[in-house]
Every structure is written in C-alpha cells, then in structure tokens.
Image (cartoon, rainbow, N blue to C red):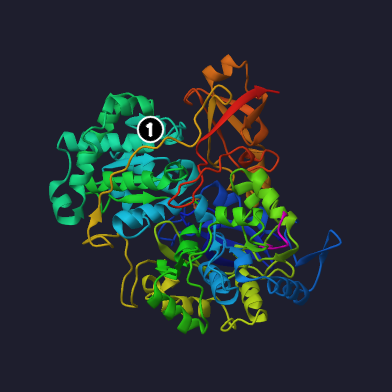
C-alpha cells in the first residue's frame, strides 16, 4: 500500500534542456512513481531513462542534506538556519566587492537565478556572477548574438519534424537530448535526410546519409568548406541574402583562396563527402542545423558558431519552419540562467551592465547604486582566487571540482579561499571544501519556472515537502539578501520574484504564472496578449540584417605530438548527467554505467596491446587518470573518448584549460594525451 500514490503533481524534468513534463505520483512525503505528462507540448508524455527512472533515487537518497552545516574545527556540524545564515553574512560582509564572487546554477529556477544575480549586484556590489553556461553555450550567446542579434535556439523542438534535412554537428542528440533524438528518428523514417558531423561515432551517425568524421577542432574548416562549395556551385539563396543579410561579399572574398583539398586534409574527411554534404544541405529545403558542445567547447568556439550561422544564412534557412540554427542546451535551465542575467556582463534579458540607461533602470527598481564594470567569468574568478584577489565565494548548485578543466588547479585555487559557502542538495566534491554548506531543496520540493532549450518558460511545481530542514534556493538567497541589508528581498514566494523580474525584462514581460498554466510560453513575449515566439527572426533578424562574418582557422591549443600522441575528446553518457551528483545516486543508472570508460579505436588498441576491460592510464600535460578500456571499432584512430561523470576518474584533471577568447569557454573537446596499459 506504501507504493500506491494518493496525489500527483505535474512538473518539469530536472535533467537536460529538452524540458520534458513529469507527473510525480506521491504518497505522503515520498515520490512513489513517475510518468510522462501527456499534456506537455514538448515531450507529449515521453521520457528518457533519466527522466523516468533517474529522479526518485536521488530525491530520496540518504545522502541528501537535511539542514545547514558549518565547519567547526574541521568537522561539519549541523546548525540552525539562523546560525548558518548569520555565519555566511558576517563572513561575506568582511570583504570588499572586488574580493567576492558568486557562481549561480543552471539547475536552479529562473526566480532563483534572478535573485542570485540581484544579490551579487545589488548587495555584494559585484558583477562577478557567472554559471555553467561558461562551460557550454557562452560561444553560442556571443556568436549568434553577433550574427543574428539573439543568442538562442532559433526554432522549436516540435518544428524540427518539418525539416527536409538535418545537419547535426558536434551533438549526440539521441543520447544527450533523447526526446529530440526520438523526433529526429521519426522524421528520418518519414523521409528527412540526415548529415552528421562528429569526431565521435554517435548513434545517429549510423542512420546518416552522410557521416563526416572530422578531426576534433577542425569544425571551422569543415563548415567553411561547405560554404565554399555552396557559393562556388551557386547553391546559395540569393534573394534571402540580398533582402535579409549583409556581409556576403566579404564572406565570399574570404573564401576565394580557401583550398578545399587542404580543408579535406585538415578535417581528415574525403572532399567528395564534404561536397556531398554541402549539396545535400543546400538543396534540401527547409534544412535545420543542430549543434551542441562539440561546436562550442573549443578555443575558437565563437568562430565555430559564426561559421554555423554563415552556413544557415547562405541557404536562407533562418526564420522559417523546419530550418534554423538550433543549439541544444545541456542543463534543464541553462537557458533560463542566462536569460536571468547570471552572467558577468548582462542583467536579465541580456541587458548590458555597461549601458548607462539600463543600469539606471535596475538601480531605480532595486533602490541601489550598481557596479558598472563587467564582472569576471568562472575561469577568471578561479584565476583571481589563485592570485589571492578574490577571497570569498558563494556557489549555488555547481560542482566545479568535476566540471571545470584542469581540475587539479581548480581544487588548488578553491583551497586558497578564505571563505567558501556552498548551497546544494548533496555534499558534492566541491562542497567538501566549503566553510558553510546551505541545504537546498530539490526540484520536486519547490515552485518556480524553468526555460528549456527552445526558450519555453514552463512551471515547476512542488510535489513533496523539502527534505528535513532543507530550503528552496530562492528562500536561502532572499534570507542572505535581507540579512546583508539588501533592499527588496522580502518575497512571499517565487511568483512575486517572477513578476519583479518580468517588469524589468522585455522578453519575459508578457509571461505570467497564470499564462504558464497551459504548456508554457516561448520568449520573446513582450506583452500579455503576445502568443510567444516559436521561431525567431521570422520577418527580420533581431539585429535588423543578419551579418556574415568571415572566420579563419585556428588549430586547437594542443595538437598531438610524440609525447602526447592521442586527442582526448569528452562528452556524456546516456545514463549519467554532468558531474553525476544526481545520477550516481540512482541505483538503476549506476548499474547501467558504474564507472568511467575510455573508448579507443580498435587499431590503436591493437597497437598498444590494450584489450576491452584493461585499465589504462591516460596522461596529459596536467595530470593522469585511469579508466577501463572499451574498444570502439568506429572511433577515429588517434582519438579517444571519455565522459566526466565520476569522481573516482576525474577526467577534467587532464582536460585543457585553453579557452575561447571571446567567451571564456574552455576547450574540453581537445586535449593531447598518452595512453599506457596499467
Ligand atoms: Fe529529462 Fe531530457 Fe530525458 Fe526529457 S530528454 S526526460 S528532459 S533528461
């Protein structure tokens, strides 16, 4: 009888950016089963293995923090909330604004991200607020904002089925965004064509009409080669280019001396395949580009995004159903955390902190003077801690020790902090370094909104009471704001926070909790009569005309050499999520993949006498880890693949901290390594 639900609540999956609808069926304080929400417009009742089986185990895990902890004489000691909050406030108050930074969370709601950036700016007086978009789609925001005027997914998930052709580059859609992967497979069954470009042989590659297995880091060359073929064979959309864009002549001129033979060699792909892909993409109307971190996590990630934008504009595939440039977001609210201004250079709605009129608007609303200089990104914050400039850090829901590249250096930097407060649902690997740990409620235990990868704002609803004395992030942050003397931190609940945010954020102005009751709304939604915007740039680009930007090729920061002859590229397992804090605590998911795997091409394995199941030491210029080998016959020789979900094998000890100068996003897709059988 304990497993028979007596209540149920519709809410949103806490994992990936698809934003599927869950029905949490509860009995008393426990979730007893989960099903898909058939009324959800994105998922229509479908769930992947993580959404269906990966929630209850972590929400009710005995490791959940059930109250705040303060480290006393080196031991974490349970304390009342008053004591924990006063400890954080008294410590943070000791530092100048330039000595404090805040890291927000793509797992937190929009309301929580809004409050966290408000706390940073209006109370701690710093714009040094950032979050994990720095690790993933910051180049998308920079690149697409420059080319189109908006850095978000142009089209909608439901609209993808209208595409005649998909070009998926640098994404493992069927495993990392499985519900979108289901839709793509259905569309392919119905006749849509598929081009996949990915150094790793992702499952969808086996269904592709053309599979381009290019060398990691050669995306700009591949995309530029496709542009060159389209221009030289006259396959471009002249009317769209003349009416909607600028900079075409400059792009064409930049490609005049571009050698296709050289490009094929750099990419490690036959030129005939590149030409075939360019022709198929350009001749299929409409054609949709999908990409993920295979494009962005490079030392030239913004150039990669600009090259994607060039390709889409050349063929007129912007502003129309079934077309577009569709960056797929990783965490379920990374779009929302960006939208809410958990970034060092913008307030909510991408309104620039450097713009005096915008700053005055927020000063007037919040009743304070605001800092006018752009703040620091996550890598800059870590550098600054290392140099002793930043002395206190408040982290909400991020696990930097496993997520950041060169994590040995990250650990060393965080250990230098005079004060570290962490707000999370577990004692993560990073929280083990904290002075105070603030126990947060899980997604199932609070109200709010998330914004998914297609810009859809959806309601998160509370199904059960918070575990023990844990509290929603919004409540904790508001308490800190009040106790630090901040004005306007007395909130009755998330809806009041949302209403304050939307009054200051034009793209969210027309979205209210009431309007979100039936399926959510896609921004921009400027007023309450506006239906939301499923397709961006339909009549004109957000910046007026879309702009072609010539892009040059820069090789990755590290190339294989005699000492480190392999390229390590990283990605995700279908059974785990990011640093694994939630999925590693789910018995069924852990059984499906209990430990880190090193995937190696069969020819490389044979040469090094490595067999499946052997333990292999993987060494880069920054350190070494060991992992179990798996032979992958379809992996490109010279390339090895690992995820980053397991603390026992912290892959990010060996990844490269080289980063994209425009966005600060690290080159997690290319590190030179050597392999030794242990
Ligand atoms: Fe959750 Fe993403 Fe799976 Fe949907 S596809 S159930 S949002 S993890």
Query: How busy is the neighbourhood of tag 1: few (under 14 within 10 Å), some, or many (20 plus)?
Result: some
Query: Toward which corner of the image does residue 96 lie, by quadrant?
Result: bottom right
Magenta segment includes 626: no
- Give the residue at x 84% y 58%: 74
- Give the residue at x 79% y 66%: 70
434, above or below 49, in the image: below
Quarter of the rendering occupied by the N terminus? bottom right
Q: Nearer the viewer, residue 459 or 291?
A: 291
In this orientation, does residue 70 appear?
yes
Q: Is residue 127 left or right of residue 359?
A: right
In this orientation, does residue 154 appear?
no
Query: Toward which corner of the image does residue 533 lie, by quadrant?
Result: bottom left
**Residue tagged 1:** 207
Quarter of the rendering occupied by the C terminus? top right
- Give the residue at x 26% y 43%: 164
231, above or below 412, in the image: above
Q: Is residue 175 left or right of residue 25?
A: left
Q: Is residue 578 left or right of residue 300?
A: right
Q: Nearer the viewer, residue 222 or 602?
A: 222
Q: Nearer the viewer, residue 592 or 31?
A: 592
On the image, the x and y values in percent for residue 232 come to: 17, 34
Q: What main secondary structure does the magenta stretch of the protein show? A: strand
Q: How many discs appear?
A: 1
262, above or below 182, in the image: above
On the image, the x and y values in percent for residue 136 come to: 49, 50
Q: Is residue 371 left or right of residue 99?
A: left
SS under mark 1: helix
Residue range corresponding to the magenta coloring: 416-423
Magenta segment includes 421: yes
């Amino acid at each position: 009888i304990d497993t028979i639900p007596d209540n149920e609540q519709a809410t949103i999956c806490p994992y990936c950016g698809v934003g599927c609808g869950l029905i949490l069926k509860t009995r008393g304080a426990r979730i007893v089963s989960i099903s898909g929400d058939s009324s959800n417009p994105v998922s229509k009742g479908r769930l992947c293995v993580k959404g269906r089986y990966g929630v209850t185990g972590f929400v009710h895990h005995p490791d959940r923090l059930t109250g705040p902890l303060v480290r006393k004489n080196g031991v974490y000691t349970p304390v009342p909330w008053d004591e924990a909050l006063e400890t954080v406030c008294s410590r943070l108050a000791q530092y100048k604004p330039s000595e404090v930074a805040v890291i927000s969370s793509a797992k937190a709601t929009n309301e929580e991200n809004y409050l966290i950036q408000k706390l940073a700016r209006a109370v701690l007086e710093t714009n040094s607020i950032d979050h994990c978009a720095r690790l993933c789609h910051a180049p998308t925001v920079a690149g697409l904002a420059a080319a189109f005027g908006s850095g978000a997914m142009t089209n909608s998930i439901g609209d993808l089925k209208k595409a005649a052709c998909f070009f998926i580059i640098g994404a493992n859609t069927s495993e990392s965004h499985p519900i979108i992967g289901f839709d793509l497979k259905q569309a392919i069954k119905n006749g849509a064509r598929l081009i996949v470009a990915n150094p790793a042989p992702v499952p969808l590659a086996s269904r592709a009409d053309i599979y381009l297995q290019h060398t990691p880091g050669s995306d700009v060359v591949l995309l530029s080669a496709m542009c060159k073929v389209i221009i030289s064979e006259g396959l471009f959309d002249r009317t769209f280019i003349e009416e909607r864009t600028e900079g075409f002549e400059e792009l064409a001129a930049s490609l005049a001396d571009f050698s296709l033979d050289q490009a094929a060699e750099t990419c490690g792909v036959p030129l005939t395949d590149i030409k075939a892909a360019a022709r198929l993409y350009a001749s299929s109307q409409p054609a949709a580009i999908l990409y993920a971190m295979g494009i962005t996590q490079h030392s030239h990630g913004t150039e990669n995004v600009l090259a994607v934008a060039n390709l889409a504009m050349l063929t007129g595939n912007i502003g129309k159903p079934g077309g577009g440039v569709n960056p797929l977001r990783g965490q379920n609210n990374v779009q929302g955390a960006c939208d809410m201004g958990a970034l060092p250079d913008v307030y909510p709605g991408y309104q620039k902190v450097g713009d005096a009129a915008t700053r005055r608007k927020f000063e007037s609303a919040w009743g304070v003077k605001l800092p006018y200089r752009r703040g620091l990104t996550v890598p800059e914050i870590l550098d600054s801690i290392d140099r002793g400039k930043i002395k206190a850090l408040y982290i909400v829901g991020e696990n930097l020790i496993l997520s950041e590249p060169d994590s040995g250096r990250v650990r060393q930097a965080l250990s230098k902090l005079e004060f570290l407060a962490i707000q999370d649902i577990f004692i993560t690997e990073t929280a083990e370094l904290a002075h105070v740990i603030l126990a947060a409620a899980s997604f199932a235990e609070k109200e709010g909104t998330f914004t998914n990868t297609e810009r859809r704002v959806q309601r998160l609803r509370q199904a059960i009471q918070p575990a023990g004395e844990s509290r929603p992030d919004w409540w904790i942050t508001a308490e800190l704001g009040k106790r630090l003397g901040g004005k306007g931190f007395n909130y009755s609940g998330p809806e009041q926070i949302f209403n304050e945010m939307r009054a200051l954020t034009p793209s969210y102005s027309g979205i209210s909790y009431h309007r979100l009751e039936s399926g959510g709304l896609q921004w921009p939604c400027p007023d309450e009569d506006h239906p939301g915007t499923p397709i961006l740039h339909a009549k004109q680009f957000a910046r007026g005309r879309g702009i072609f930007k010539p892009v040059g090729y820069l090789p990755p920061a590290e190339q294989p050499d005699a000492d480190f002859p392999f390229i390590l590229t990283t990605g995700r397992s279908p059974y785990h999520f990011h640093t694994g804090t939630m999925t590693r605590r789910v018995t069924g998911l852990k059984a499906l993949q209990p430990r880190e795997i090193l995937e190696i091409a069969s020819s490389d394995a044979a040469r090094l006498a490595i067999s499946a199941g052997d333990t292999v030491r993987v060494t880069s210029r920054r350190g070494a880890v060991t992992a179990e080998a798996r032979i992958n016959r379809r992996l490109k020789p010279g390339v090895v693949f690992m995820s980053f979900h397991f603390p026992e094998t912290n892959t990010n000890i060996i990844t490269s901290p080289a980063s994209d100068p425009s966005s600060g996003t690290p080159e997690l897709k290319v590190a030179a390594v050597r392999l030794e059988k242990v």
